[in-house]
Amino acid sequence: MANATLTTPWQGQNYLDGRWHPVKGEYLENMNPARFEEVLGLYPRGTPLDADLAVTAARRAFPGWRRTSRIKRGELFFRLAELVRRDTDELAAVLARESGKILNEARAEVVEGLHMIEYVFGTARQPTGDVVDSEIGAKDLYVRRKPRGVVAVITPWNFPFAVPLWMLGPSLLEGNTTVFKPSEETPEIGQRLMKLFEEAGFPAGTINLLHGLGEEVGEALVRHDDVDVVCFTGSYQVGSHIRRLAAESDHKTCACEMGSKSAVIVCEDARLDLAASAAILSAFKTTGQRCVSAGRVLVHRRVLDEFSQRLVEQARRLVFADPFTPGAFAGPLVNQSAVNKVLFYNDLARQEGAKILLEGGRMTDGEQAGGYFVSPFVYQQEYGPEKRTIREEVFGPHLAIVPFADDDEAIRIYNDTPYGLSMAVITEDYRRWRLYRDECDYGMGYVNLPCIGAEVHLPFGGVKRSGNGQPSAAGLVDSVTHKISFTVNHDTQITMAQGMSADVEKQT
Ligand code: NAD
């Protein structure tokens, strides 16, 4: 935080009511997680007053936007897709620099955002309701969706391009207006996205960008009376706080996607080559900082030793390096508190009696010493309901291998966390994967795959502490619209349903 002069390459501004606002007052620094000393840019530390300006602009724009044809709203997304395609490489480089994701993954995220935009454009000409028969022949019943109003979109640093689009896309297409608050860790990619929305021609006020701290502007948005829906993706701690705040207003709803303790389950009949690759990708891609990252691999005792050996050999060889290093597998953690958290859980695993299979921790040599680099930590841990390391989200390269004796035990262990986001089962047996599909608590399930890798045209959500039943991406439409029923009588007299009398004239 600083009152600094803007000599750095990137310079953030809020975008309110169709205008960029030069910042007066305090700034937030955007740091490069791969190089401690590098300030990438300076961004406004928005205030509750800015939040109010953003919501007021969105409220003002709502009636005009709601009345615009849904197909015309959709066509703006076609233009937006063209712009994202034009700028893909540049967007990927920005994303890699400020989030620490390796370039290939950063690019994949931009492509995922592009897919969401294309999906939104494609759905614009799809039906938005149903025509339903009435028990009275002369009546037609319609079910239609209406926008809810002003949607606040509050997003995490780890998917700073795709996740905002999962939520902004359906919200805007359905006729809502929006205020977008990107994470303070990754403000630049939010800024770039906003510029593309502007260039695509979205009218003033329909989308507003507000930089700042979560507990300041984020909370001001959640508390604002004129916000109708809060779409939040981030940690359980913040999400549960937001749910409580939103519940204080009668009209406000919220869709919260939160953390996890996802897992890969390796059955006794699994192909172990495939199982090891699935576990490595699930646990260590994005340095373990995906909401769906596997903090646990549950392994049948019969294949435990062979599987563990394969996994550890592969984990030892993974390259964690600057995002622009060719061939890097993953980059740094996002900041010092993320490092502290991972090191805390590594120590806790030792205290909880883990058998350490691969020592991991702060990387202190070479270029890694200058960033938040942490190497994989892998251990074997017997299941126990009191063991925190196999139940709590760590959000880093920290992996427990937990042995099990049969399918029932694996399912019990899998479900014994407060979370339920993603699950992958590795098996050649079609009866077995069906059992896991039906008995485990999760929102996204996979067979013979990692537990990461969703696609935008699926709903993305979790159960328990992972989500409040309002999935994102293709599933978000249900959170940002309400369904109305509408009944039309084509007769010249009134006939009521359920046989109720409608003979008013005889009532003298
Ligand atoms: P975070 O909860 O710290 O922050 C998320 C957003 O909330 C940020 O924009 C932040 O500024 C804002 N915020 C913070 N305090 C707030 C408050 N009091 N009121 C309103 N807004 C506030 O999360 P993060 O560190 O950015 O992201 C990592 C977390 O997100 C992990 O737990 C991960 O599992 C989760 N995540 C979940 C999904 C999913 O779809 N389930 C996807 C990505 C990340």
Image: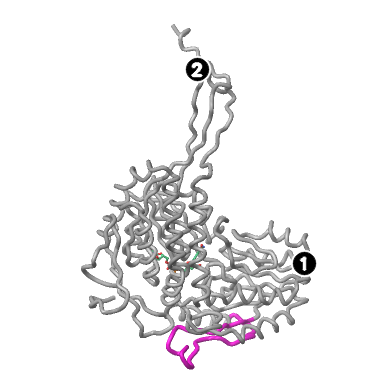
Residue span colored magenta: 352-379
Task: Identify which residue, 124 or 476, lies in the foreground.
Answer: 124
Task: Identify which residue, 217 or 60, lies in the foreground.
Answer: 60
Q: Nearer the N terminus, badge 1 or badge 2?
A: 1
Cβ(mark 2) to ligand 1 < 8 Å?
no
Residue appearing at x 53%, y 20% in the figure: 496
In this rendering, position of residue 355 left or right of residue 74? right
Q: Quadrant of residue 386?
A: bottom right
In the image, residue 123 sits, relative to residue 80, either above or below, namely above
Q: Which residue is mark 2?
A: 494
Q: Secondary structure at mark 1?
A: loop
Percent from the top left, x then y, of residue 263?
63, 69
Q: Amino acid at mark 2?
A: Ile
Does the magenta portion include 372? yes
Does the magenta portion include 155? no
Give the position of the C terminus as an image quadrant: top left
Residue appearing at x 30%, y 74% in the figure: 42
Q: Secondary structure at mark 2?
A: loop
In the image, residue 167 sits, relative to residue 346, either above or below, namely above
In this rendering, position of residue 292 left or right of residue 61? right
Q: Quadrant of ligand 1?
A: bottom left
In this rendering, position of residue 326 left or right of residue 30? right
Give the position of the N terminus as an image quadrant: bottom left
Q: Which residue is mark 1?
A: 428
- Disc 1 and disc 2 in contact, CB within 8 angstroms: no
Q: Quadrant of residue 87?
A: bottom left
